[in-house]
């Protein structure tokens, strides 16, 4: 009986290690989705849970499946998991959610992630205020880098969405200000043609057709104002995002290093 | 809080706009085929915007898109769908293209 039990133990151990080895080979071949399935199997078959969790997290991250990673790490409590979880939101274009996740400003890690999320959202003043509150020694390097990034973001020339909207009173001018020259010509010609036709039809006493076309023209005119505001705001956000994205991996690695100590 | 009447009005205007777009997509658009350089097409973009944001904002977004269609393409990310290059411009106001 004793031998039978020992044999079962050895067999199950070798089965589990074979499963993990297979998953590792898939990981090495960058077949992340298949590797996740194998690691999950091993996890539920009582393999090395910490290792499997570590590898599943890596598979999602390296496979750039941020939605999957968010789903996987939902409700995590480990600080490194929290870093992955927050960065997945940032990479997924949802800094607003990362901001909410890191609202506990008593924790230095959350304070740092909060500042990073604020940078994405264009809240430079809030970043400045919160950076002053980071006093922990191990976070000083990251603090300095965040300060530098914030300064760089502040120095950028952004287009005012309000000014774009104001200029759009003249169709196309708002788009031109926002940087979309071709669109500005298109908006100008579209509005000119529609409103020109409205007045011509009115002159010929075709009031119904004139009125119907005026409704369409109003849609295009208001669309031109709305679009100009949106275009300026979108470009500002993209400009900001491009600058931060270039440095995001540096922050990620540094935070992991600090929290793994 | 919105009254039930306002909800009915809102949904009926959305439905009628969607019907017009549906008619265009079924009977008019197929006569000249898939031409829009952007993904989703302008009519699909408008239909999705109306569904998501209601008739008023949806139509504004749609008219804005029609004026932008095929122009200033360097502002949009591109990808190949069925061996054809499309410029991606989604109606969602994610942070990447969120209006403040």
Image: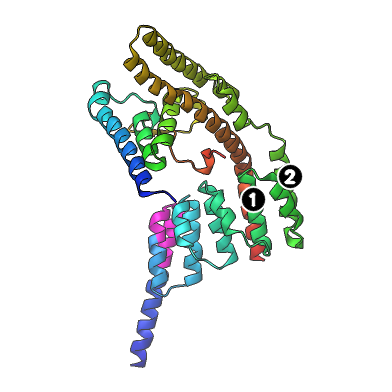
Tag 1 subunit: A
Is residue A156 or residue B27 the one in the foreground?
Answer: B27
Q: Position of residue A22 (x, y in %)?
A: 40, 62
Dot 2 corresponds to which residue?
A: A148
Tag 2 subunit: A
| Quadrant for the C terminus of chain A in the image | bottom right
| Extreme residue toward the bottom, this view | A1
- The answer to if A102 sits in the magenta stretch is no
Is residue B51 or residue A137 the one in the foreground?
Answer: B51
Is residue B94 or residue A204 the one in the foreground?
Answer: A204
- The answer to if A28 sits in the magenta stretch is yes
Element carrying mark 2: helix
Q: State the extent of the magenta-drawn residues as a range.
A: A19-36
Image-based side of A74 in relation to A146, left or right: left
Image-based side of A209 in relation to B73, left or right: left
Q: Position of residue A164 (x, y in %)?
A: 59, 27
Picture layout, residue B96 above or below residue A220: below
> Residue at image x 49%, y 60%?
A57
> Residue at image x 72%, y 58%?
A139
Q: Which mark is residue A116?
A: 1
Picture layout, residue A185 above or below residue A255: above
Is residue A253 or residue B53 the one in the foreground?
Answer: B53
Image-based side of A97 in relation to A148, left or right: left
Element carrying mark 1: helix
Q: Main secondary structure of the magenta part?
A: helix
Local packing at callout 2 (Cα closer than 10 Å; few below 14, some 14-19, many 20+) is few
For the residues tagged 1 and 2, is the chain the same?
A: yes
The image quarter in which residue A68 lies: bottom left
Q: Position of residue A59 (x, y in %)?
A: 47, 56
């Amino acid at each position: 009986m004793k031998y039978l039990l020992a044999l079962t133990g050895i067999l199950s151990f070798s089965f589990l290690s074979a499963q993990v080895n297979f998953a590792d080979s898939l990981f090495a071949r960058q077949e992340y989705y298949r590797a996740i399935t194998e690691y999950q199997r091993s996890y539920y078959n009582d393999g090395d849970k910490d290792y499997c969790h570590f590898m599943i997290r890596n598979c999602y991250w390296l496979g750039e499946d941020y939605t999957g990673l968010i789903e996987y790490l939902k409700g995590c409590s480990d600080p490194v998991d929290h870093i992955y979880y927050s960065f997945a939101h940032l990479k997924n274009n949802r800094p607003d959610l990362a901001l909410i996740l890191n609202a506990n400003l008593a924790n230095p890690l959350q304070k740092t992630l909060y500042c990073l999320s604020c940078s994405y959202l264009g809240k430079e003043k809030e970043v400045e205020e919160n950076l002053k509150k980071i006093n922990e020694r191990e976070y000083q390097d990251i603090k300095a880098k965040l300060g530098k990034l914030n300064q760089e973001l502040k120095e950028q020339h952004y287009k005012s969405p309000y000014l774009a909207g104001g200029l759009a009173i003249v169709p196309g001018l708002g788009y031109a200000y926002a940087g979309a020259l071709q669109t500005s010509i298109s908006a100008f010609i579209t509005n000119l043609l529609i409103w020109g036709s409205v007045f011509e039809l009115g002159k010929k006493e075709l009031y119904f057709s004139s009125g119907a076309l005026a409704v369409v023209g109003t849609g295009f005119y208001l669309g031109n104002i709305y679009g100009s505001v949106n275009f300026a705001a979108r470009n500002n956000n993209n400009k900001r995002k491009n600058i931060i994205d270039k440095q995001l991996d540096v922050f990620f690695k540094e935070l992991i290093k600090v929290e793994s100590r | 809080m919105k009254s039930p009447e306002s909800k009915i009005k809102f949904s009926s205007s959305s439905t009628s706009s969607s019907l017009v777009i549906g008619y265009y997509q079924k009977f008019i658009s197929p006569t000249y085929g898939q031409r829009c350089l952007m993904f989703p097409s302008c009519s699909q973009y408008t239909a999705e915007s109306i569904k998501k944001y209601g008739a008023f904002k949806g139509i504004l977004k749609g008219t804005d898109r029609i004026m932008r269609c095929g122009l200033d393409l360097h502002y949009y990310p591109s990808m190949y769908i069925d061996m054809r290059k499309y410029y991606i411009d989604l109606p969602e106001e994610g942070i990447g293209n969120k209006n403040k």
